[in-house]
Amino acid sequence: MHPQPPATDQSPELKPGKNRFVRLSVNLGSETSEIFQELIVRKGLSITEGISRAIAAWEFLEDEKALGNQIAVVEPDESVRKVVLL
């Protein structure tokens, strides 16, 4: 049996396509799992949609950081807090 080459951007399983899904299995700590479950229940989302939204938010934050932009929270009283991303 020969080892499989590592997945690259050229691998068919990583190329975006309409209605194509990749099954992933993840292990989460109990606290992280509870937080995630609370969030998807609060928003009425499936686990799949919750993961998709989390990844989209992460991508957005990383892209903005890469552009040199800062992320901020604007409070109801219009005060602004800078969000520090690690």
Image (tube, rainbow, N blue to C red):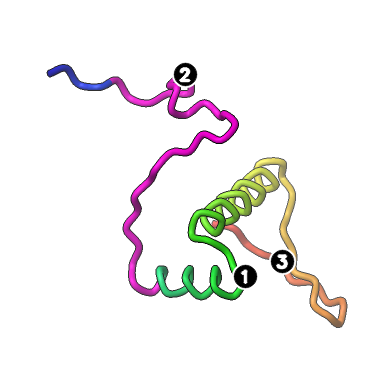
Q: Secondary structure at mark 1?
A: helix
Distance of mark 1 from mark 2, alpha carbons? 35 Å
Residue stretch rendered in magenta on the structure = 5-31
Give the residue number, with chain letter if any, for mark 1. Answer: 43
The quadrant holding residue 4 is top left
Q: Nearer the viewer, residue 59 or 73?
A: 59
Which amino acid type corresponds to the residue marked 2 in the rendered image? Gln
Which amino acid type corresponds to the residue marked 1 in the rendered image? Lys
Give coordinates of residue 41: x percent, y percent. Answer: 54, 73
Disc 1 and disc 2 in contact, CB within 8 angstroms = no
Q: Measuring 41% from the left and 69% from the top, which residue is drawn there?
A: 32
46 horizontally vs 64: left or right:
left
Give coordinates of residue 57: x percent, y percent. Answer: 63, 54
Q: Measuring 67% from the left and 64% from the top, which residue is drawn there?
A: 83
Give the residue number, with chain letter if any, for mark 3. Answer: 82
Looking at the image, is 50 positioned above or below residue 77?
above
Q: Secondary structure at mark 3?
A: strand
The quadrant the N terminus occupies is top left
28 horizontally vs 56: left or right:
left
Which amino acid type corresponds to the residue marked 3 in the rendered image? Lys
Q: Measuring 71% from the left and 45% from the top, which residue is drawn there?
A: 68
Give the residue number, with chain letter if any, for mark 2. Answer: 10
